[in-house]
C-alpha cells in the first residue's frame, strides 16, 4: 500500500515539475 502511495506521489511531483518547467520556458519566451 505504501508503495502505491509513494508511486502516486512521485508521479504527481514529476508532473508538477514538468508543468512548472514548461510554464517557465513559456513565460521566458513571452518575456
Image (cartoon, rainbow, N blue to C red):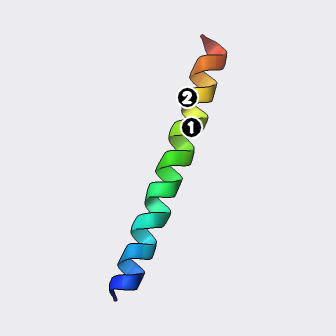
User: Residue farthest to the right?
Assistant: 29
Which one is in front, 17 or 26?
17
Mark 1 surroundings within 10 Å by alpha-carbon count, few (fewer than 14), some (14 through 19), many (20 or more): few
Q: Is residue 16 above or below residue 25?
A: below
Q: Are marks 1 and 2 in contact (CB under 8 Å)?
A: yes
Residue drawn at 60 percent across, 18 percent down: 28
Residue that numbered label 1 is attached to: 21
What percent of the width, then of the height, locates residue 13? 44, 56
Residue drawn at 56 percent across, 46 percent down: 18
Judge from the rendering whether residue 10 lies leftward or rightward of residue 23; answer left or right: left
Specify the quadrant of the image occupied by residue 9: bottom left
Q: Is residue 9 above or below residue 14?
A: below
User: Residue farthest to the bottom?
Assistant: 1
Q: Check residue 10 in the rendering and tell me which mark sits there, or answer none.
A: none
Q: Is residue 28 above or below residue 8?
A: above
What percent of the width, then of the height, locates residue 31? 60, 10
Mark 1 → mark 2, Cα distance in angstroms: 5 Å
Residue drawn at 56 percent across, 32 percent down: 23
Q: SS of the residue at dot 1? A: helix
User: Residue farthest to the left?
Assistant: 2
Specify the quadrant of the image occupied by residue 2: bottom left
Mark 2 surroundings within 10 Å by alpha-carbon count, few (fewer than 14), some (14 through 19), many (20 or more): few
What percent of the width, then of the height, locates residue 5? 36, 77
Q: SS of the residue at dot 2? A: helix
What percent of the width, then of the height, locates residue 19? 54, 43
Residue that numbered label 2 is attached to: 24
Judge from the rendering whether residue 4 lies leftward or rightward of residue 20; answer left or right: left
Amino acid at each position: 500500500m505504501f508503495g502505491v502511495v509513494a508511486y502516486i506521489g512521485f508521479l504527481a511531483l514529476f508532473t508538477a515539475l514538468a508543468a512548472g518547467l514548461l510554464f517557465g520556458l513559456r513565460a521566458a519566451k513571452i518575456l
